[in-house]
Amino acid sequence: MAVKFYTVADLVMRLSEAKRGGTLERLSKDIGRTDLLILDEWGYVPVDREGSQLLFRVIADSYESRSLVNTTNLEFSKWGSVFTDDQMAAAMIDRLAHHGHLLVFEGESYRMKHALMKQR
């Protein structure tokens, strides 16, 4: 099984650089050869319009052809503000939710629970 892991910020940066460098199709094919694509920190860093469009292409190309795991602590209603376009965010959500499973984890953060700088 071929698996790739990216933070969303890193993937968008790589996609943008590949577009500028004329290697976007090569990167898209490389991503397309994966069985599982893991996108971490979804929505932590705002993405400009071009980055949102490039990320949408990855999601659209992955739809019904590979498994995706997205990690985020942003509710769907906030995605439009991160990806600069409510309609594009809705289209991403539509593709992700169609065959998806939403897992919600509640409780204290593992990192906060084990933080060295905990206030006492």
Image (spheres, grey):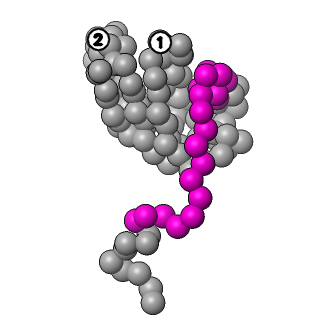
Determine which quarter of the picture holds residue 3: top left
Q: Is residue 53 visible?
A: no
In this view, the residue in front, 54 or 74, is: 74
Which residue sits at x=43%, y=64%? 110
| Amino acid under disc 2 | Arg
- Mark 2 secondary-structure assignment: helix
Label 2 or label 1, whichever lies nearer to me, is 1
Question: Is the C terminus in the top left, top right, bottom left or bottom right quadrant?
Answer: bottom left
In this view, the residue in front, 96 or 53, is: 96
- Mark 1 secondary-structure assignment: loop
Determine which quarter of the picture holds residue 97: top right
Residue 108 is one of the magenta-drawn residues: yes
Q: Are there few (<14), some (14-19), or many (20+) residues within 10 Å of tag 1?
A: few
**Residue 1 at x, y percent in the picture:** 29, 21
Nearest to N terminus: mark 2 or mark 1:
2
The circle on residue 65 is 1
Relative vertical location of residue 37 with respect to residue 45 in this rendering, above or below:
above
Q: Is residue 52 visible?
A: yes
- Left or right? Give the position of 59 relative to 89: left
Task: Name the residue furthest bottom.
Answer: 120
Magenta region, residue range: 93-111
| Amino acid under disc 1 | Ser
**Residue 104 at x, y percent in the picture:** 60, 48
Residue 36 is one of the magenta-drawn residues: no
Contact (Cβ within 8 Å) of mark 2 with mark 1: no
Relative vertical location of residue 39 with respect to residue 53 in this rendering, above or below:
below
**Residue 103 at x, y percent in the picture:** 58, 43
- Left or right? Give the position of 30 relative to 47: left
In this view, the residue in front, 48 or 73, is: 73
Q: Determine which residue is flagged by label 2.
A: 26
